[in-house]
Structure formats: C-alpha cells, structure tokens
C-alpha cells in the first residue's frame, strides 16, 4: 500500500522533521553567564558553537557540554551568537527573547 504524502505526519498538520528544535530555559546549564543567550542540557559537545563564535562559548570538561561564557552586546556580536544558535545541530542554544 502506498502512503499518501499529502497527509500530515502529526494531528496538528506539522511535519516534526521540519520543526526547528529550541533550547529549553528550564534545562539551562548552570555555567551559562546570566543574560539573554544560554545552552541547555541537550548539548552534545559537538564543538560547532565554539568554532563559530569562540569568544562567546566555552567547553565544560566535566559535563562535556558548551556554555555561554560571555553575552553578546553589539549587533554584530548578537548576529554571531544567533548564527551559532541557528547552526546548532541539537538546537541547544536558547534565546530568552525568542518566541
């Protein structure tokens, strides 16, 4: 039997494979410096954010996760952190101002 690709995968009509993931504020890691951006516990330590924006992200060797060590201030810095968040494979970088 062929599947009808026009049928939604969820009752809501959304395709879960196309939904962006987003970090959860309640899972915010304690090492994050206070401020707008944060990394949550879903981080898999892939190093992407630290490569893309090393002035804002650091690695916690004990937990094997990244965290925000410095909050961005200028529009250029904010854009760099937003880009790192957009490129995060697990959606582990959050923005308190989003949503």
Image (tube, helix red, strand yellow):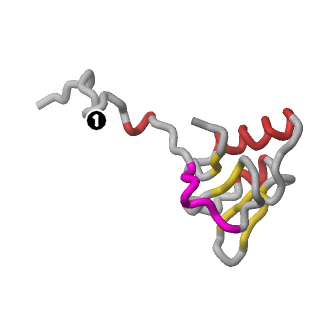
Looking at the image, which residue sits at the far left? 1
Quadrant in which the C terminus is drawn: top right
Assign the magenta stretch its main secondary structure. loop
Q: Secondary structure at mark 1?
A: loop
| Residue annotated with mark 1 | 10
Location of residue 42 in the rendering, given as x and y in whole percent from the top left corner:
55, 59
Query: What residue sits 30% from the left and 31% below the top?
Result: 12
Dividing the picture into quadrants, the one containing residue 14 is: top left
**Compared to 44, does 76 lie above or below?**
above
Instruction: Give the magenta range.
Output: 23-30
Quadrant in which the N terminus is drawn: top left
Dividing the picture into quadrants, the one containing residue 64 is: bottom right
Left or right of 56, for residue 88: left
Looking at the image, which residue sits at the far top? 6
Location of residue 90 in the rendering, given as x and y in whole percent from the top left corner:
55, 51
Left or right of 18, for residue 45: right
């Amino acid at each position: 039997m062929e599947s009808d690709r026009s049928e939604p995968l969820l009752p809501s009509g959304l395709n879960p494979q196309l939904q962006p993931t987003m970090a959860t504020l309640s899972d915010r890691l304690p090492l994050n410096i206070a401020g707008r951006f944060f990394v949550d516990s879903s981080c898999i330590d892939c190093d992407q954010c630290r490569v893309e924006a090393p002035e804002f992200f650091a690695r916690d060797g004990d937990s094997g996760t990244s965290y925000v060590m410095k909050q961005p201030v200028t529009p250029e810095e904010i854009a760099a952190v937003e880009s790192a968040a957009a490129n995060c494979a697990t959606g582990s970088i959050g923005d308190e101002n989003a949503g």
